Image (cartoon, rainbow, N blue to C red):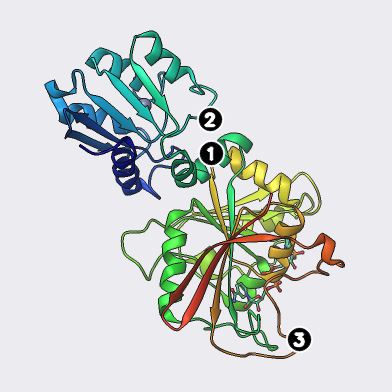
């Protein structure tokens, strides 16, 4: 017989099947165990479709009676697009429910657990909680702040340059590293760049190098509408593009951009305040944002304290030059006491390059 932890690990692995496709919902996995035998499995795969518990209990059929259910997130207790899973588990007659972590959604937040306990079901909470929290860090951040989880990405030479002194940046890293970037893109609701990057690189910001990915919404920060009308993000219709402008952008100019796939979003202030932007994007159900540069935009996100994760690629190349840009522009922090401190979460070799994933110390 396996331990609670082992079954929960199985449920966490199953939950991962939904990564990148459940937004704005969390990813969830469930395993039903009866007399030491796994009799049902399930994952939540898409918002509006059955929750993990429903799939797992259906698969278990009659055997779910008296069984133990392992679920990576507290079962829901409210009527959303589907009926509450807590009710389903009660009706099914399961004996015990093991839960990794609670659901911070105010509609659930402990109520699912309460409902189960009131019905006489034994509930155990907190098995592999850290792993489960990590798995749904985007969802938890979004629920708690109503703003997207922000990942800042850059590709640099070993000497920390993101372009040459003449502005060339294609390509610093290898194809393998760029494929990895496309994988990240596919996992996000939206990708964001500054207008100078659009002018300099004319990127498509689509998912091309890996299969099966959806194209996220493309967002350009462009206070006065300098984005060229023939830029790929305006012209190609491969995904929606939102041009974010300041309050003083001319109405006549805005109309030149508006089309089926292109929207202009005006801020309340004459400039683009990152905190305001994130609130607006959160209101439009953007739960995760992949910020791909350039250095000016990165600086603004860092200064706003709006970065949740950094993904940095380093190529074994030296670009050199005082004038060549580095990943974070602006004036930087003047004193070591003020610098942004990070924790390294992952170091990986990708082809000839190195990827480092880091998160800010809180
Ligand atoms: P950015 O792409 O960061 O764009 C900056 C411009 O965006 C600003 O000048 C501003 O123009 C507009 N903007 C609007 N609101 C904001 C805001 N709140 N914060 C910051 N910018 C805002 O420009 P950079 O010149 O810094 O970077 C471009 C260079 O970086 C290019 O050479 C490109 O090749 C390189 N690059 C390299 C990458 C890499 O990973 N190697 C990735 C991306 C770019 P306005 O006032 O008109 O609105
Ligand atoms: Zn549910």
Mark 1 highlights which residue?
Answer: 140
Q: Quadrant of the N terminus?
A: top left
Residue drawn at point x = 51 percent, y = 23 percent: 109
Of label 2 and label 1, which has the lower sequence position?
A: 2
Q: Specify whether 46 is left or right of 325.
A: left
Observer able to see residue 162: yes
Task: Identify the mark nearer the N-term, 3 or 2.
Answer: 2
Disc 2 and disc 1 in contact, CB within 8 angstroms: yes
The image quarter containing residue 53 is top left
Establish whether ligand 1 lies closer than 8 Å to the Cβ of label 3. Answer: no
Location of residue 359 with respect to 123 vertically, above or below: below
Could you say where residue 74 lies in the image, as x and y percent from the top left? 42, 28
Foreground residue, 162 or 10? 10
- Cβ–Cβ below 8 Å for labels 3 and 1? no
Measured as percent of width and height from the top left, residue 220 is found at: 62, 60
| Residue 261, position as x, y percentages in the image | 49, 54
Which numbered circle lies on residue 104?
A: 2
The front one of 180 and 163 is 180
Residue 186, by quadrant, is bottom left
On residue 206, the disc is: none
Q: Secondary structure at mark 1?
A: helix
Quarter of the render that holds ligand 1: bottom right
Relative height, residue 353 to residue 88 (above, below): below
């Amino acid at each position: 017989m396996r331990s609670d932890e082992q079954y929960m690990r199985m449920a966490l692995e199953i939950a991962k099947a939904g990564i990148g496709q459940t937004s704005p919902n969390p990813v969830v996995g469930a395993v039903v165990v009866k007399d030491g035998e796994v009799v049902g499995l399930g994952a939540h795969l898409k918002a509006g479709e059955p929750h993990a518990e429903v799939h797992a209990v259906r698969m278990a059929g009659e055997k779910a009676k008296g069984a133990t259910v392992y679920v990576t997130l507290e079962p829901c207790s409210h009527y959303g697009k589907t009926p509450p899973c807590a009710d389903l588990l009660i009706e099914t007659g399961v004996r015990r429910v093991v839960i990794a972590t609670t659901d911070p959604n105010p509609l659930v937040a402990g109520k699912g657990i309460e409902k189960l306990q009131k019905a006489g079901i034994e509930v155990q909470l907190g098995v592999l909680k850290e792993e489960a929290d990590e798995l749904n860090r985007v969802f938890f951040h979004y629920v708690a702040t109503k703003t997207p989880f922000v990942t800042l990405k850059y590709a640099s030479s070993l000497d920390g340059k993101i372009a040459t002194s003449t502005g060339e940046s294609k390509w610093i890293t290898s194809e393998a590293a760029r494929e990895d970037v496309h994988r990240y893109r596919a996992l996000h609701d939206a990708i964001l760049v500054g207008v100078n990057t659009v002018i300099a690189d004319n990127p498509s910001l689509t998912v091309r190098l890996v299969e099966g990915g959806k194209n996220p919404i493309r967002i350009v920060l462009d206070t006065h509408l300098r984005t060229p009308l023939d830029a790929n993000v305006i012209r190609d219709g491969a995904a929606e593009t939102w041009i974010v402008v300041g309050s003083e952008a001319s109405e006549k100019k805005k109309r030149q951009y508006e089309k089926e796939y292109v929207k202009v979003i005006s801020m309340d202030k004459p400039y683009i305040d990152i905190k305001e932007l994130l609130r607006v994007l959160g209101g439009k159900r953007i739960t995760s944002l992949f910020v791909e540069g350039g250095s000016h935009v990165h600086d603004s996100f860092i200064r706003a304290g709006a970065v949740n994760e950094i993904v940095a690629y380093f190529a074994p190349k030296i670009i050199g030059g005082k004038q060549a840009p580095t990943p974070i522009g602006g004036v930087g922090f003047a004193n070591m006491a003020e610098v942004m401190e990070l924790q390294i979460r992952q170091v990986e070799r990708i082809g000839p390059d190195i990827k480092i994933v880091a998160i800010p110390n809180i």
